[in-house]
Image (cartoon, rainbow, N blue to C red):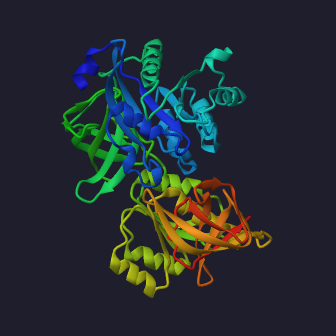
Amino acid sequence: MTETIANNQFRPPIVAVMGHIDHGKTTLLDKIRQANIAAREAGGITQHISSYQTTVKLKSGKTGTITFIDTPGHAAFCNMRSRGANSTDIAILVISAVDGVMTQTKECIHEIKKSNIPVIVAMNKIDLEGSSPEKIKGQLVELDLTPEEYGGQVAVIPVSAKTGQGIDDLLEMILLNAEIMELKNEPEASLEAMIIESRLDKSRGPVASAIVKKGTIHNGDIVYVENIFCKVKAMINSNGQNITEAGPSTPVEILGFEKTPSVGGLILDHSVKVDHNETLSLPIRDITNNSPRLNIVLRADVEGTLEALKASFGDDVLVISAGVGAVTDNDIFVAENAHAEIFAFNVAVPKFIKNLANNQKVKIFESKIIYEIIENIQTQVLKLLDPTIEETVLGEAKVIAEFKIEKVRIAGIQVTKGEITKGDLIHLKRDDQIIKDTKVEGIHQAKNIIDKAKSGGEFGITFRPYIDFNLGDAIIAYK
């Protein structure tokens, strides 16, 4: 791989794929790479930034190599997304031709503009009924991303990640932009590579995923991320192969760091001293503040996610301690002393730790889906912060049955009071206790999909995020 790059005058473009949840970013990359990545993502969300390099062959006969970064779509990852954009040459903004511009789309546009990099819009799901290309183009004009056909400079390519329609045009546009940019290949320059993910692996120690911008990394090289030392023990490319060197635009996993480096850090061939302390576990912070705050202990599987989660909290949340890896007995004792709850994202919580938590009366909230953790924390903060915030009950129902359609569990409910509308906030109550909060994703009556479930009727209802309901549970819709 490296020899091919080094022989070229220009290096392959590094392309960040951005967009709102469920608009098809990972599925689009899946189609390009013909590798089933999208199906493995919990909750349909790409939880971490991943990178891969692929050689594409167009119908025109043109070939070219492109390095893709698949960036997470949820608002919690704004910080990671910003760093992803800073390490890239071109941004692909994926927008659903059915749903149009959404909240995270606007955040992506903000990051792209701030990074001052060229953007190509991939208008996905063009094959679906209800797609509205002209509406989406109008929304782009309002956001100062004027399409070429409207006299602007932004290429808008209609695509279908499902059927492959338009993907050839998208790839051709990427390669055309790369040619115009004349991205200089500098394999002999001083090393500069950006870390886009890092984690602590049980068997391999600290592992960092990076993309080389300039220079070349070799096995055995001594490199640094700020003041963190690394003698490169091994490197693995995006195909899972061990390689001995990685040149410009190459995504690579690096082993040999003395401790886990920060996401967004630069790998250089010299040390840079910094003032802050790099640590996987934060010290206990001062909690003698009189203003109401939610104290939490945070655990995540990788450094990037941990950092993104912390960045998503306001001043109302006090992170007492945070770390990468499984929940430990120390976390339990720290949480007990600080009257904090533990939030564990995509990490193991051993049985003896759960037993210890029960004994110490410490709550542990586990999830593999980012927005479940964020929404749970936000709900607790709202109740803690402002006693003037009141909930208005819109409708009440009882779960009386369960159905399955294509493995999706649907709650059969009987509405006993008011009405429940698609998009409503929901409390799931069991034995008069709120078990979980979610939203109404869809309402069914017989074979029809409807927007409202009114008092006295029986309906099928689905939730997002998914909740594990039981027969007899109460459903409370509120605002």
Q: At x 56% / y 61%, what residue is drawn?
A: 462
Q: Residue furthest right?
A: 388
Specify whether residue 70 is in view.
Answer: no
Image coordinates of residue 156 in percent, x first then y, are 57, 23
Residue 67 as seen in the image, left or right of residue 144: left
Image coordinates of residue 99 in percent, x first then y, are 62, 40
Image coordinates of residue 100 in percent, x first then y, are 63, 36
Query: Quarter holding the N terminus?
Result: top left
Quadrant of residue 109 within the rendered picture: top right
Q: At x 23% / y 37%, what residue is drawn?
A: 221
Specify whether residue 356 is in view.
Answer: yes
Taking 340 as reference, is 117 above or below it? above
Quadrant of residue 30 within the rendered picture: top left
Taking 157 as reference, is 361 above or below it? below
Which of these two is toward me, 443 or 329? 443
Residue 4 as seen in the image, left or right of residue 182: left
Image coordinates of residue 460 in percent, x first then y, are 58, 64
Query: Quarter holding the C terminus?
Result: bottom right
Q: How many marks?
A: 0
Which of these two is toward me, 448 or 333? 448
Q: At x 50% / y 57%, what residue is drawn?
A: 370
